[in-house]
Structure formats: C-alpha cells, structure tokens
C-alpha cells in the first residue's frame, strides 16, 4: 500500500506561491530523492507532508498508522549543555537502552552512547540524528538535506548508511538533497522540483530530461557547477564542471 500520496498540492506564503499542483507518491521500501534549485519548494513539500505547513490547495494522504522518522537539516545543541548521546536519544522517546544501542548500530555509530553531543564531529552528529529517527522503527525516513555541511566523503558515507538501513529494514526513504552526484546513485526515483514537478523517474531518465538539464546543465558535473556558481559566484561553468567531476 502506498505510504504517502500528494495530490494537486499547492502551498502559498502570503502572496507567494512556492508550490503549485504537485503530485507524487512514495511506495514501501523505495528511496525517492527530491532535487531542485534553492527556492524551488523542496522543504515546503516536506513540511506539508509531515503536517508542519498547511496546503493552500490539494491534500497529503498518509497510510493509516504510518510511522515517520525525520532527520532535520540541522539541529542546534547548546555546546555548554552537558547532554550525552544516550540522554539525547531519550529526550522525546521512552525507549529501552537496547533500542538505543540498536538504533546507533543501524546508524553506523555504535560506540557513541557515552559521548557528549558537544564533542561530536558534524558527521557523527548527523548519524546520531539518524539513529534517533530510526529508534521507533519507522516505515519511512524523511531527510531534509541531512548532509549539508559535511564533506564529500562524509556525505557519501551517510548515504551509503541510508542504503544499508533500507536494505536491512525495508524502510522507505524520502530525501531532499543538493548533492546530485551522490544522490543519483542512491535513489530508485528522482523528482525534479521547481515550484512544480518538472520531471521524475529513474536517475538515468531524470538526468537526461530537458527540464532537468535546463535547471542543472548536462550531467551531474553541470549540476554541481550551478550549485557552486550560486554559492561562490564562480562564473566559469566549464572549469567548475571539471573540478566537480574530479
């Protein structure tokens, strides 16, 4: 049975319509990635799915009893606050120590239980957020650019862990990402969003779609060049594409 169905969804903030007439589904066990430029409505779509944003039109239907694990883009923990990973894992969940251990193992960080949250590297912190999302054995994981701020190796390792979680638990994954070079290999289906669904399908189909290429250039090198251009104001796309491919 379909886990999430989005029908004719529109989201408006004041006079600004950020999403219009979006239709999509997520099926059990699949990894679906949403890509799109900044301001394309990716986070608004995720917020509408979890009920944090009210649609101006259309609807979101979740499978009855659907358990969602959510990994946010970032979470600020006061560095002066003495809180261990174990205590953090218990903050909003009444769970056993065994469940904590199993969730940390599933996230690939079984040895962090006694560490202070403030002492974790960026990659370790995101793995703990992943463990916390896994603790109640969700049917689907939602990830909002969960590797932002990690280096390429850290990002690749995180997505490999996501694939391992899916393989071992059958959990579906819906994620937003800018890192097209990694995401394309990790996804069963890609949805290209720019206020509306521009194109969708397998990674190979989307990468060759004219709508995708209009947004990101040809291939993932072009996509990375566009992303770098937006953030670092480099203007030589050819040079950036070569750098991105290396």
Image: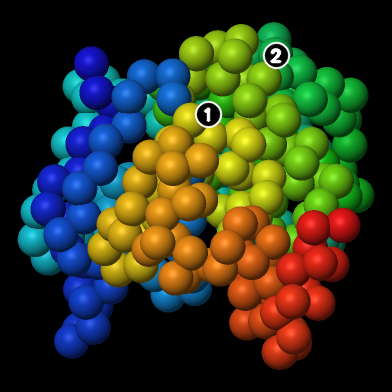
Q: Can you identify the residue that label 2 sits on?
A: 102
Which label was assigned to residue 127? none
Split into 4 quadrants, where in the image is the C terminus?
bottom right
Q: Quadrant of residue 78?
A: bottom right
Q: Is residue 8 visible?
A: yes
Residue located 42% across and 75% down the image: 39
Other residues around mark 1 within 10 Å, as few (<14) / some (14–19) / many (≥20): few
**Foreground mark, 2 or 1?**
2
SS class of the residue under badge 2? helix
Vertical side of 203 occupied by 223: above or below? below
Instruction: Please tell me how many numbered marks the rendered image carries.
Output: 2
Give the distance between the C-alpha atoms of the residues marked 2 and 1, in whole angstroms: 15 Å
Split into 4 quadrants, where in the image is the N terminus?
top left
What's the coloring here? rainbow
Residue located 38% across and 40% down the image: 201
SS class of the residue under badge 1? loop
**Looking at the picture, how far across and down is residue 89, in whole percent?**
66, 32
Judged left or right of residue 86, residue 188 is left
**Looking at the picture, how far across and down is residue 194, in whole percent?**
35, 67
**Looking at the picture, how far across and down is residue 157, in whole percent?**
79, 36
Residue located 81% across and 77% down the image: 239
The residue nearer to you, when weighing 218 against 170, is 218
The residue nearer to you, when weighing 214 against 196, is 214
Vertical side of 25 occupied by 212: above or below? below
Vertical side of 203 occupied by 78: above or below? below
Please report contact status of discs 2 and 1: CB closer than 8 Å, yes or no: no
**Looking at the picture, how far across and down is residue 222, in whole percent?**
64, 66
Q: Can you identify the residue that label 1 sits on?
A: 93
Q: Is residue 96 visible?
A: no
């Amino acid at each position: 049975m379909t886990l999430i169905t989005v029908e004719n969804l529109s989201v408006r903030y004041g006079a600004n319509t950020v999403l219009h007439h979006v239709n999509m589904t997520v099926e059990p066990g699949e990894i679906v990635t949403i890509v799109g430029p900044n301001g394309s409505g990716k986070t608004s779509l995720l917020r509408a799915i979890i009920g944090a944003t009210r649609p101006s039109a259309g609807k979101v239907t979740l499978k009855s009893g659907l358990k969602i694990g959510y990994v946010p883009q970032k979470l600020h923990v006061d560095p002066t606050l003495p809180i261990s990973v174990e205590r953090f894992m218990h903050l909003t969940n009444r769970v056993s120590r065994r469940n904590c251990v199993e969730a940390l193992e599933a996230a690939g960080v079984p040895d962090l239980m006694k560490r202070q949250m403030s002492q974790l590297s960026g990659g370790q912190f995101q793995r703990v957020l992943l463990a916390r999302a896994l603790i109640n054995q969700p049917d689907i994981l939602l990830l909002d650019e969960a590797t932002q701020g990690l280096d390429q190796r850290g990002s690749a390792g995180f997505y490999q862990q996501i694939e391992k979680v899916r393989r071992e638990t059958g959990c579906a994954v819906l994620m937003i990402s800018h890192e097209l070079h990694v995401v394309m290999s990790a996804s069963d289906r890609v949805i290209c969003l720019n206020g509306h669904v521009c194109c969708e399908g397998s990674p190979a189909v989307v990468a060759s779609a004219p709508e995708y290429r209009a947004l990101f250039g040809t291939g993932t090198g072009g996509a990375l060049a566009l992303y770098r251009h937006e953030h670092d104001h480099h203007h030589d796309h050819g040079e950036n594409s070569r750098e991105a491919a290396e």
